Image (spheres, rainbow, N blue to C red):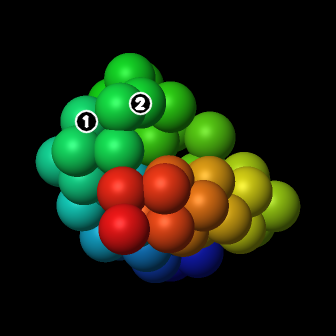
């Protein structure tokens, strides 16, 4: 049961990032790092920094 719940949460995190990352100039495959909680935080920081660069 825990594995199914984990797979649902991973899908709910990775799929939107897969679509958002190209807009920030990153390869969409980097969204797979979001499986790790630290990876998600790092990706969010990178996206925020790149959003600031765009203005």
- Element type where label 1 sits in the image: helix
Quadrant housing residue 37 = bottom right
Quadrant housing residue 46 = bottom right
Percent x, y of residue 32: 50, 37
Q: Which mark is residue 22?
A: 1
Percent x, y of residue 14: 37, 53
Taking the image as shown, residue 11 lies to the left or right of residue 23, namely right
Give the residue at mark 2: 26
The residue under the point 43% across, 73% down is 9
Numbered label tally: 2
The residue under the point 50% across, 31% down is 30
- Element type where label 2 sits in the image: loop
Percent x, y of residue 1: 50, 76
Q: Is the residue 22 above or below the residue 39 in the image?
A: above
Instruction: Decide: few, some or many residues near mark 1? Use Cα within 10 Å; few <14, some 14-19, many ≥20.
Output: few
Q: Is the residue 14 above or below the residue 31 in the image?
A: below
Camera-side residue of 6 and 38: 38
Camera-side residue of 2 and 18: 18
Percent x, y of residue 55: 36, 68
Taking the image as shown, residue 39 lies to the left or right of residue 27, namely right
Circles 2 and 1 in contact, beta carbons < 8 Å: yes
The residue under the point 81% across, 61% down is 38
Taking the image as shown, residue 25 lies to the left or right of residue 5, namely left
Report whether residue 47 is seen.
no
């Amino acid at each position: 049961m825990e594995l199914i719940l984990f797979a649902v949460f991973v899908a709910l995190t990775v799929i939107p990032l897969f679509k958002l990352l190209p807009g920030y100039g990153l390869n969409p495959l980097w969204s797979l790092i979001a499986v790790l909680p630290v990876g998600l935080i790092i990706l969010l920081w990178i996206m925020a920094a790149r959003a600031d660069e765009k203005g």
